[in-house]
Image (cartoon, grey):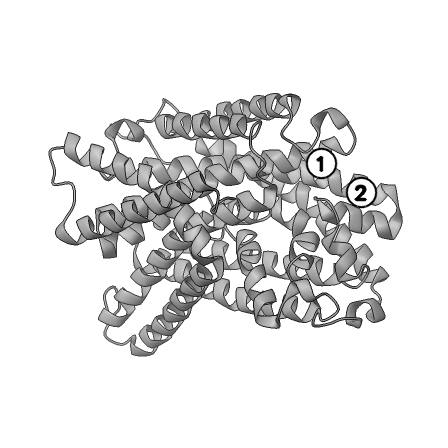
Amino acid sequence: MPLPQAQLRVGALTALVVGSMVGGGIFSIPQNTAASAGVGATAIAWSITGVGMLALAFVFLNLALREPGLDSGIYAYARASFGPFTGFSSAWGYWFMAALGNVGYYVLLFSTLGHYWPAFGDGNTPLAVGCASLMLWSTHALVLRGVREAALINQVTTVAKLLPLLAFVLIVALAFQAPVFTADVWGRANPQLGSVLEQVRGMMLVTVWVFIGVEGASVYSAHAARRADVGRATLAGFVFVLALLVAVSLLSMGVMAQPALAQLKNPSMAYVLEHVIGPRGALLISVGLLISLSGALLSWLMLSAETLYAAARDGAAPDWLARENARGAPASALWLTSGCVQLFLLLTLWSNSTYLSLVNLGTAMVLLPYTWAAGHALRIALRGERYHPGEGGRRRRDAALSLLALAYALWLVYAGGVKYLLLGALLYTPGALLYAWARRAQGRAVFTRREWVGFAGLLAAAAVAALGLRLGWLGL
């Protein structure tokens, strides 16, 4: 007999969206954006990101209403339009992004503590990795207790971490100086930034990273008390986080010049507030970061395990990943997720990868799942599937928004460049092999003819990436 689903209401779903998006990224936004762009290009990049991500938010909102039979959307939408292999690849890419994001968050958390206790260093010392591992498995145990309990704790941490962020916006707004903000609007004093287009392109992966999680309510749609709450939570969470991110990014450029911001260590918000009100500012933001990361780590562990679980439940992944425990938690998928995060944490002891490089690679992994979701929304709008005869105007609006979201996702693939396409192919390949193994074990045909072509292209790109890493011309 199937276990009852936990019923999450709009508050819990909104907290899941906000909690997923507001993790560690926002605390590093002042430095991350200033390192790539001046004030003018930053404003343009946020405008593009805001419009593009709003279109994606509407895609997830619309699909939640139009596709009530498709749960765990980021995976299910890709499968519905493009087949099981693409669906599983979407789940794999999303899961891998979440795992990398967790590692990046742990590194950022303990590098913050390293400001006060040098033994934690930059977040990748043996002590830091040991403490991160303890936190990982404590969070793992919490999620094993069930979705409802974990979601309730996520609501509490979401509220707690927003208080220091709102305090930052208020204090920095009061300290804002127009002459500082307008001193070098287009970054011409720093030739390394390049043209305005290069500045905007350089910012794109960073700005997208802080919005990843907008689909959080969609991933947990199977647990929603009402289907309409999924769309409301997605839109409300997005609008709130967009306003918060733009305020943090642009207001910081009004208290410190772009070159000074670009040189800050992360979490750069702490040093911006320290510049304004002294050491108390750094302490306030550091505490907020610790709370924020604790909540984000919980959200992303839940989301990543749920995605693999959904793929296994539909037969696209090995059956054992669909096993639940007595509390209805996706136990097998959770063990695999936590085990991989633990492995990546250990690898940071020997890796020189920075938080920003993990962010960029994680963002590259999620671009294809976003592209497939937008493609599915466009397909059903153009064909009129799930629409009533009198909804012609609604269809045209949804088709336009889906096309905008698809164009934005493809622009991001371009902005990321060939480097991240190749690295992404290398990380997608193990997922393709896992999918093939699952299909063969189930006695099904592994790939269709079209999927064989895609698989061959993936292997070729992965081989190029592996060669590039070996020869040193490709790296993080």
Residue 18, given in percent of the width and then of the height, sits at 56, 49
Residue at 70% from the left image edge and 57% from the top image edge = 248
Tell me the residue that label 1 is attached to: 112
The single residue placed furthest to the bottom in the displayed view is 393
Residue 87 disc label: none
Residue 239 in sight from this viewpoint: no
Residue 50, given in percent of the width and then of the height, sits at 55, 65
Name the amino acid, label 1.
Answer: Thr
Secondary structure state at the residue bearing disc 2: helix
Residue 73 in sight from this viewpoint: yes
The single residue placed furthest to the right in the displayed view is 278
Residue 474, given in percent of the width and then of the height, sits at 47, 46
Q: Is residue 27 left or right of residue 145?
A: right
Residue at 37% from the left image edge and 70% from the top image edge = 403
Q: Is residue 338 above or below residue 186?
A: above
Name the foreground residue: 267 vs 281. 267
Q: Is residue 169 above or below residue 358?
A: below
Name the foreground residue: 163 vs 290. 290
Look at the numbered discs 1 and 2 and tell me whether their residues touch, using CB distance below 8 Å: no
The single residue placed furthest to the front in the displayed view is 471
Residue 7, given in percent of the width and then of the height, sits at 42, 40
Name the amino acid, label 2.
Answer: Ala
For marks 1 and 2, the one nearer the N-term is 1
Secondary structure state at the residue bearing disc 1: helix
Tell me the residue that label 2 is attached to: 282
Name the foreground residue: 427 vs 215. 427
